Amino acid sequence: MRDGVTCPALIVHCVSCHTFQSTMAHNHHHDSESYHGDPLDTPSPTEERESDEIEEQKHFQKVLMALAFYRRHSLIMNNRRRHDYNLISQHHKKLLPDYLQKVDQVDKLIEENALVLKEIVKASGIFSETEVQASIMNNRGKKPPVSPSDMDKVRSTLKQFVRDWSKEGEPERQAAYEPILNELESIYKNMPLEERGQVRVLVPGAGLGRLAFEICNRGFSCQGNEFSFYMLFSSNFILNRVSAPEEFSIYPFIHSFSNIRDSEQQLAPIKIPDVLPSSLPPTADFSMVAGDFVEVYGDNDKSEGQWDVVATCFFIDTAKNIIRYLEVIHKILKPGGSWINIGPLLYHFENTPGENSIELSLAEVKEIAEKIGFTITNEKTIPSTYTSNPNSMLKYVYECSFWKATKK
Amino acid sequence: MRDGVTCPALIVHCVSCHTFQSTMAHNHHHDSESYHGDPLDTPSPTEERESDEIEEQKHFQKVLMALAFYRRHSLIMNNRRRHDYNLISQHHKKLLPDYLQKVDQVDKLIEENALVLKEIVKASGIFSETEVQASIMNNRGKKPPVSPSDMDKVRSTLKQFVRDWSKEGEPERQAAYEPILNELESIYKNMPLEERGQVRVLVPGAGLGRLAFEICNRGFSCQGNEFSFYMLFSSNFILNRVSAPEEFSIYPFIHSFSNIRDSEQQLAPIKIPDVLPSSLPPTADFSMVAGDFVEVYGDNDKSEGQWDVVATCFFIDTAKNIIRYLEVIHKILKPGGSWINIGPLLYHFENTPGENSIELSLAEVKEIAEKIGFTITNEKTIPSTYTSNPNSMLKYVYECSFWKATKK
């Protein structure tokens, strides 16, 4: 990162200096399932910091292990298909002569995915290949030390690469990122490109960083903030370790055989990245910051009034208490600054055991935003999928709510 | 049922005689989660019949208990919202002054849903109200004797009523049922309405019976076949126990607060049924048969060549081995008979622990259908949701495959 960031969080990676640091300057846990936090709005006391850092390290390790164990877990899941095929009658087998060939092919593509995940682990610089290999060897013959939900997250991570860094993800980016970029262009239409580097845009929930990258690509300075280590490790890899477009091939749609039109499509590679992430205008700053949005930006006064624009894309429903998100966005914006939002309201913590969650309707969210001190304009509904297989017979279509809100 | 059915299964309910029988003439288990069957294609031996019947009774009871415990379970889930609201700051509470009122209103609507579910249990005629009340009293203060997945199924059952028997379900029925009805009309366009009663149409996976009812409504004789007791009890209720259109109000979208545009919409009643199910042409037979499709129609020779049309709607992916479904459909059709299909390929048993599952691509399904002895024509792709909240910000859109296949 080129400019001084006024938050206490770790800078996880930076296009210019290519560093990835594991030290956390603040206390929190990453990824929802390991977060058993204090009641809403109550910060953890300082004396808990040390044990929090140990927890943090454990969680680091857990995520890296999940990435490392993807191969073994996926091969076991795929082997179930061989087992089930062997149980059908000879007559049925004759009707399906190529089935096992397809299952074998999926094994090979799991290995290909595993190679990319290995690069992600390697790029983190936290564990050596020897350490990862040692852990895999130690667990040989045992149940892998990762949960099915960890494995879900690894598979979702592969799909995030499609959304953010492949040509197949273009329709999703057109639907969800373009409206934000157009709004930015419209706000700063009278500002020459070379001056735009002074405009500071924050993207909470930055995922694999494409939206933040595109904002920078249009000349603005942009900081992405992300909570999930799956996303942080993966964005570090794609932003800092890739040297050519389409350098890697992934196969994100081989794990389920449901809703597939034809196998050839299903088994085809997705090439990443579609563009080289290191090509950015020299006047714009680009950085990624690890940590929980409220803890990084809300819990310190230095963040106040620091940002010209906050752009949230499929983010606000990750809150346990969305009012707190709205307040922090309002606080960190400069007077007259803009909050641009697009996304649904799929509250991530609704009905999560042990978690608190406040779920508001769209009407309630907008009403509270006005009460907090925003003026909402430019409202639209924009349908969009999210990390979808473009060839699947099933699509989750979000009727996203879009708006620009100006800090009064 | 008016005509003699050539299968060994129980007739569960009948518009003309209004009976509901609990005796099973065949051995199987209902609902996926309790089915731990033999390897595919291997029928259970006859000596296991008695213990199977006990299992069947237990499962009956389990489903009825889930319907009965919906109220208590849902009130507990909703109470979590009060708890979480109480944990937010006074300042936030002031921003959300009506929140607890909404939570109270949801409690009332849970009670309304529970009244309808009570009618369903009562209509089954299996347990008396006293027995159900006794079981609820016995479990007071204990964890309800039902699993979260049972409760999911009860909530899904409420949504099935929207799809099949409400005006809000009209768009889904237009998308999924109309193409089948149009195809039937096209095949029998030269046959006068009064003769159509001779045409025998089978609807496997009939759910709450609307498609089968609409087929009858166009003069054809139609038998619905259904495996799930949730659906069987509920279709018995709606087909045989309702005396006026819009007699009951249900509230199927109160259980999740995610992706809600405004609370008023969310809390509005869905009135069922939109039409009175007992109004059918006198020349057409209408019946519903309980049981697994392969066991009821595949495992006995009397079913062979008995049906003019088999209409499958969101059904073929419920198979553990879809080839077996295709073979049975082929076997029970008369020569030259038609199989009309619409739906996706969301294989219900993919990755279900302890279950075998063969998942084929659409191309493979069609190839095998041709090999078995079908000629596929009239292919289209039709997008449709399934038991969707029409006002939700998230829709699962299936790109359904439609075809007519003629038995060679």
Image: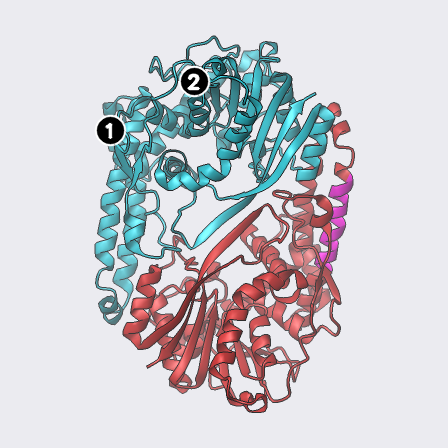
Chain colours: A red, B cyan
Q: Which region of the structure is painted magenta?
A: A101-115
Quadrant in which the N terminus of chain B appears: top left
| Nearest the eye: A132 or A156 | A156
Q: Is A321 situated left or right of A220 in this image?
A: left
| Residue A91 vertical placement versus A100 (above, below) | above
Distance, label 2 to label 1, CA atoms, is 34 Å
Where does the image place residue B101, in percent across and percent down from the top left? Answer: 21, 55
What amino acid type should be assigned to the residue bearing mark 1? Answer: Gln
Chain at numbered mark 1? B
Secondary structure mostly seen in magenta is helix
Quarter residue A276 falls in? bottom right
State the image coordinates of residue B222 (x, y, percent, origin top left).
Answer: 47, 19
Residue B286's disc is 2
State the SS at label 2.
strand
Above or below A360: residue B319: above
Q: Position of residue B128 (x, y in %)?
A: 26, 21
Dot placed on the residue nearer the N-terminal end, 2 or 1? 1
Q: Left or right? Give the position of A191 relative to A255.
A: left
| Residue B133, numbered label | 1
From the image, state whether disc 2 or disc 1 is nearer to you.
2
Task: Please give the chain letter of the residue carrying mark 2.
Answer: B
B381 and B123: which one is in front?
Answer: B381
Q: Is residue A178 visible?
A: yes
